[in-house]
Amino acid sequence: MNIQLPAIARNTILCSVFAACLPTPASADPISTDRPDFVESSLTVGTGTFQIETSVAMERRDGVDDRPQTLATPTLLRLGFSENWEARLETDGLLLQRSDASTPQADGIGDIALGVKYHVPSPGPADASLAVLFHVDLPSGSRAFRASGVGTSLRGVAEWELPHDCSLGLMPGLALNEDDAGNRYVSGIFGITVAHAWTPQFRSFVELASEELGSAGHGDTQFSFDTGLVWLINDNLQLDTAAYAGLNRSTPDITLAIGLSARW
């Protein structure tokens, strides 16, 4: 089964070309992104800086009868309103879903999440770089992809620089969501990632992540292993790719993504 995405492909190409032509900001540090791994960066973008992180992602679920496939354009917009605070808008963007079953295809847009990130200016334990993120997920997408109700999440991030050009990141958190029956429930969030910088422009990472540690009677636990590569084209432009493998039945079997991030 083939999925063709002319609209999504054109959208991503146009975003990439537009981002590459943007004027560069006055910043001495290379761009720091929250993608492609699950664990967020502990850094904010800086006062007056706007950053876009977009991608095309393909997800497959082979462990269920209709073998659904979903193509999405996950996108994160970040705007710094102080050195330690940023406003955030996140969405799965345009979505196309196909399956082997006779059910109709589902096309539309994903929900929007609004949030803030705070970078703690003082180092934490063992000189960790720390951040706190709060998001509100709004049921604003197309009917086929819309959540049952408003959700919220609170996450903490800690990052450490390790010997031999390696780094370690941890992200625990909690989410409050609503199931189809209108009942509110709490689930956990957790990720751990290890990265290695092969050169100043090229790094790779491996990660274990759980987007949802479900509570009894609500939401299934999702658990995945992922790995990826990041290429810093210049201080303001980054290209990345990642692959995610599901480690249980409730997690997509495989997700592949390629992304572009830019700031100005």
Image (spheres, rainbow, N blue to C red):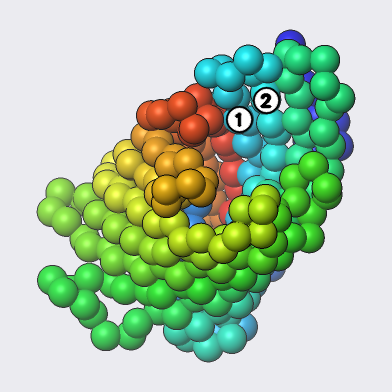
Residue in the image at 51% along x and 26% along y: 254
**Percent x, y of residue 30:** 45, 63
Which residue bears the numbered disc 1? 59
Please state which of residues 147 and 52 is positioned toward the viewer in this rendering.
Answer: 147
Q: What amino acid type is highlighted by mark number 2?
A: Gln
The mark nearer the N terminus, 1 or 2, is 1
- Residue 90 lies, in percent from the top left, at 65, 61
Which quarter of the picture shows residue 119? Answer: bottom left
In contact (CB < 8 Å): disc 1 and disc 2: yes
Residue type, label 1 = Glu
Mark 2 closeness class: few <14, some 14–19, many ≥20 residues within 10 Å: many
Rendered view: 24 above or below 148: below
Give coordinates of residue 142: x percent, y percent: 83, 49
Q: What residue would you read off at disc 2?
A: 69
Few, some or many residues within 10 Å of mark 1 (<14, 14–19, 20+): many
93 left or right of 131?
Answer: right
In the foreground, 125 or 182: 182
Task: Find numbered disc 1 in the image and state the secondary structure of the residue it sits on.
Answer: strand
Look at 38% across and 29% down and name the residue there.
Answer: 247
